[in-house]
Amino acid sequence: MYMIRKPLFSLITASATAVALIAPVRGQMQDQTQVQDKTQARDRTQAQDFSIAAQPMADALSQYSRQADVAVIAPARVTRGKTTAGLAGRHAPAAALEKLLAGSGLVAARDAGGAVLISASPRSTLSGAAPSTAAPETTETDAWDAGAPDGYGVETIVVTGSKIPRQEFMSTAPLSIISSEEIKQSGFVNIDDTLLRNPSVGVGLGSANGTRNENAGAAFVNLRGLGVNRSLVLVDGKRRVSGSRSASAVDLNTIPAALVERIDVVTGGASAVYGADAVSGVVNIITKNTFDGLEITAGGGLSQGGGAETYNISVLGGSGFDDGKGNISVAVTYNNAEALFAEDRDFARSWTALRRNPENTGPDDGIFDQVTLRDLRVNTYLYEGSFIVDDMLYAYDRTRGLRLVDQGTPVSRIVAVGGEGRNINDDNVLRIPQELLSLRGDLDYDLTDDIAFFTTFDVVRTETTDFNRYIVDDGRSLFGRPQLIRRDNPFVPDEVAALMDANGLSEINVRKTPIEYGLIAEDHDRTLISSVSGFRGNIAGRHRWEAFFQYDHSMNTIQTDNARIEQNYLNAIDAVTDPVSGETVCRSEAARAQGCVPINVIGRHPFTDAQRAYVSHTRLQDVENTLLVAGGQMNGELFSLPAGPVQYAAGVEYRDETLRTRDDGLALANALVLSISPRAPVDADFDVAEAFAEFRVPLLVGRPFADYLELEGAVRVSDYSTVGRTTAWRVGGVWSPVEDITIRANYARNVRAPNLFELFESQFDGQISFRDPCFVENLSAGANRAANCAALGVPADLEPAGDSVDAELIQVLGGNPDLREETATSFSAGLVVRPRWIDNLVFSVDYYNIEIEDAVGSFDVETITNRCVDAATVDNVFCRLITRGADGRLVSVSGTPFNIGELTAQGLDFQVAYDLPVGDGQLSFNLLGSYLIENEELVDPTDSGSLVINDGEVDNPALRWALTTSYAKGAWSAGIINRFIGASKLDRQVTDEAFDINEVDPFIYTDLRFQYAFDDRYTLDAIINNVFDTDPPFSDETVDGTGRGGLYDNIGRFFQLQLTARF
């Protein structure tokens, strides 16, 4: 189907060979990802109770972090395969950790910020994160380099959302962390599917809804359901180039899951810290940038129903050099995820859709306006072709000859339930395939005791085939001129000729889905190159600095196979008999001179090479994005207050982004089938200079009703070449009235500048088909439709033109250079409870509210046309986007972006974590959930009728949660994950009688995990996703688990095995 090109494959193969020869690597932690503990003066020598069972080391350290109330950084690459005998009784924290690590080959050190770092070997000051040069002492008083206070919080690693190091529950904004073990045990080779299981992540773009999309093969995250352009993705704390011509979003599919150490998800505005796009939150992907020795992981997965198979292998290795001053690591990854077709699943095999209810008599009659029907078929789109004679539908093939078409039970003029019409799901794809090959390298070198050089590069190649629909040849003037076959065409069979003669016809219009021509398939061949280099260091051990330069380049070459040259095709089907030779030739002499080869469209006839060469074309498009960033920053301590040091972070950045697109010459000449829209070339860019500062001030510690109190603030000033100067800021605080309770709050003003596509994409006409709400069969779907359609000049008996199922219209797409920046205010407040009387229990709940003004938005044709005629009057913003002809038919709809009035979202996030010993093992519970209160768009602030409600619908259900229950004992662990998707509706704003199925019931999916560590070298993971083989819910929007129904699994029961070997 598609293969990674040989030159790059050879490069990766050679690199993999080199990796296999590398000795164990000296670990490192990025300066940006260090953790600072809460500055609370607690005595590290004081003994406390511990209860940690024998289990895998990673789980044990997580529990130690909670019980010792200390920050622990334990990279998964270090703890994999390690186990502990456990710990019980009263111990000082340092002594407890020594016992926990006994015999594992792991050591602990404390960094300047106070975090405890676990490693397999000593780390140097700069290339690593800890200043220790030897294994730490384990006395009660100075076990971890006694220069910093103990930690505060559970399994604190690195907190995204601030450039000042801190811990998870010390963050002022809601934060969740997905570990590398969770990613591996999700059973997916791409991280977008894993992220979608986080309740705060909405339906974005990914494997299940990327088909027939210009970004097919890419994956974009959508936090809070506010759109992919408002969710900022970072890699190791830095931006990455967009993988799209139509969005600023980062393509998650260019980040192999095997290279991810963890993912931090901050669901709160962070523009003051990271700049534009961080309106709804930040996803920071922390990579495995160093390796101890060599690690090889190989795995595969298959579904019980067939399709969607996965294969993956990764090789990671590294080594220190020059007496420990330098460190180099290399990683090579290959992933392959196969396609899943609708024909592979019973629930998706037939076309299911909402259609007019023939029993409906009008509004408020208690009868459903539209009903959900299965096995729908289009009678005029037969694969062998059909034609109408004397109001009768005929078809012809060589086996059965001329016959009347079995039209099933009609639901409209040409759509029926059953019969022999075409099932348009025959060519549907539920999950598109993808192949990935990546090479990554990291180098760190200590130039002096205080200055280190670092460089990182990534080369990622992905290939995807987007299987588009078959071409449909019918009588519609927009998508192709009628296929008129004249009586003298020698391809006309005798039976058909006799029928034509009997009815006095000189020509017939053949309607057909030419399956023999093949699918219009788009191959997306993406190459991403990312390089970051710079210097980092420290000043007096109290101030850390970094200066860096980054250049990213993304290229997507889109190859469209079977793009039909329309005029050539029309020439080829108009055949005559050559009076001299008696051969069948094209009627047009000019066409014959250009190599026209005649084609028979009556019946099924495989295309010859000559026929295909004449009528088909391979269209090529190039989409190129670049990102250049230069920046510097510093963080550290300014001075000390009685409650602790005042910390700061400050820096400057310059960023330049470009977008370049090129289309095929024949497409630009409008020579291809009209459903392929030409795209004018784009050469666009913008740059921005930014300065930012952030402060964290501890006010009180150890006081009555103020066990700890701190305030923080941040500001970023940006100067864009497009929208001018913008300012984003944030204030927040953390208050612990008593040791058990922490209250946190955050208020921010965020900014998003329009991206290059939104501003500068050349406007173009996209041809689409669509069910006009003013068709007579749809008038009863809304109380105001009939009156509003009449007001627009639409005849009361309007039906689809010709032989079409739908309306045909032009959707005007492209950019809008007059767009303004978005401004948003966000507020969050949360409570964290760690009761002293219940060991190892943590509970948190956070409220959030986001209001976006001048939000840049556009709407699909369905939303625009329905809202236009369902409003109180036609004097509304949606009707102003529509053009109708003198006959009342839709001509065009504007889909260009504009600044809408307001977009709002509010809800609750909650999390509960609890560990307890059971027998010789440890039982753990972790509940992560989100409750959506509101997600609305007020398009026109002066018109309440322009309100679009999104919350509670299938892509934004009110309640989602995931409960992980696991048990670990010695070398093995097992877990069960229950994922809940709450009840929802297809459309919250329609009447109760609009659809027979408007409500979708709650759903629960169950996954199983099992892991066994044979020894320090080998670990086996076994995974079963969707244990009960649950199908997506039956409704018009969710039946196949794609599009808006992307939250619902469409693979079914899925098995995966992964084996990891370490040397």
Image (cartoon, rainbow, N blue to C red):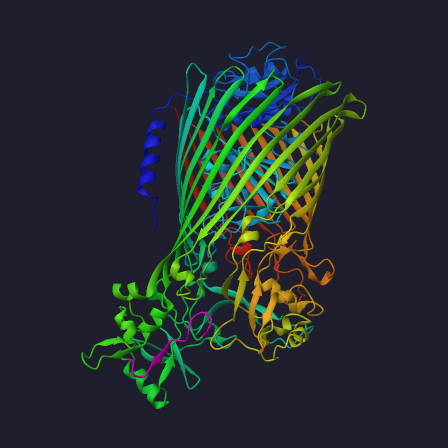
Q: Tell me the magenta residue range.
A: 476-489
Place of residue 665 in the rendered image (x, y in percent of width and height, measured from the top left): 39, 59
Q: Residue furthest left?
A: 581
Left/right of residue 956 with respect to residue 384 in the rendered view: right
**Can you say which quadrant of the picture contains the C terminus?**
top left
Place of residue 507 in the rendered image (x, y in percent of width and height, measured from the top left): 36, 83
Question: Residue at the spot x=69%, y=67% of the render?
Answer: 871
Q: Residue 336, located in which quarter of the rendered image?
A: top left
Q: Is residue 837 visible?
A: no
Q: Is residue 259 magenta?
A: no
Question: Residue at the spot x=74%, y=60% of the render?
Answer: 942
Q: Residue 341, located in which quarter of the rendered image?
A: bottom left
Left/right of residue 749 with respect to residue 688 in the rendered view: right
Place of residue 666 in the rendered image (x, y in percent of width and height, measured from the top left): 38, 61
- 699 over 823 or under it: above or below: above
Left/right of residue 30 with respect to residue 465 in the rendered view: right
Q: Is residue 477 magenta?
A: yes
What secondary structure do most residues of the magenta stretch adopt? loop
Q: Nearer the viewer, residue 728 or 1016?
A: 728
- 427 over 682 or under it: above or below: below
Q: Is residue 1039 visible?
A: yes
- 103 over 898 or under it: above or below: above
Place of residue 805 in the rendered image (x, y in percent of width and height, measured from the top left): 50, 72
